[in-house]
Image (spheres, grey):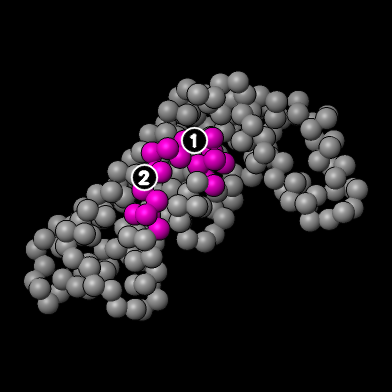
Amino acid sequence: MSIRTEENLFDRLAEDLIWRKREITILRWLMEKASPDRLGPLLRSTVALVYAHWEGFIKTAGTAYLEFVHFRRLKHSELAPNFVALAARSMLRRAGATNKVAAHLEVTKFFLSRLNEQSRLPYRDGVDRGGNLSSGLLKEIVETLGLEFTPFETKVHLIDERLLRARNTIAHGEYLVVDVAAVDELAEEVLGMLEAFRAQIDNAAALGTYRSGNVN
């Protein structure tokens, strides 16, 4: 179902987050109950799953918000600058990759004469650009959506080292020693970041910060 209303968006985010939280909660409970000989594999599996839900929710929620803004059917001139940039992204890429005037004219005409046209945002791949969800990619996604990176600034090391690097080590078949307390704390931190990301999108939709001149 297309995300055309705030309620559609709020429901989509809530539904997507709840099953992820449930899986992480189950693994945290299993960690507490596991015997020593089974704990190592369970801890490494938990790190990998926590990362999967980290990347999965951020990209799913970001895509859902873009779809919501797309179906607002606003003119380019009515959108906040970040969404205008997204609408023009493919043109800007073509213009940046060539010295041919035709590509440059396409960009010029867009900003001179097409700003009053109805916007069409590439919401399906607007944030899901592939690659691991590092703090750098998270910042790109946040800026694309017109959100704030401030809540994540103190989490950069956690994201890049304790989460992403650990996940990559495990995914590449290398041995990694982790303990229950560290993995449990990591899971709690990631759940907090997912909630913070969801809250920003909910607020942006409710306050209409996707509109031009309505950016907090």
Q: Magenta span has 3?
A: no
Tag of residue 147:
1
Disc 2 vs disc 1: which is toward the camera?
2
**Nearer to us in this view, 63 or 77:** 77
Is 140 on the left-hand or right-hand side of 17? right
Res. 59 visible in picture: no
**Nearer to us in this view, 84 or 160:** 160
Is 212 on the left-hand or right-hand side of 164? right
Residue identifier under label 2: 154
Q: Residue 112's x, y, as percent? A: 83, 30
Q: Residue at x 19, y 73 (%)?
A: 40
- Binning the other alpha carbons within 10 Å of mark 2 as few (below 14), some (14 to 19) or many (20 upward) gives few
Stretch in magenta: 140-160
Q: Magenta span has 145?
A: yes
- Binning the other alpha carbons within 10 Å of mark 1 as few (below 14), some (14 to 19) or many (20 upward) gives many
Q: Amino acid at mark 1?
A: Leu
Res. 165 visible in picture: yes
Secondary element under disc 2, as helix, strand or loop, is: helix
Find the residue positioned furthest to the right: 101
**Nearer to us in this view, 114 or 68:** 114
Position above or below: 145 against 22: above
Tag of residue 176:
none
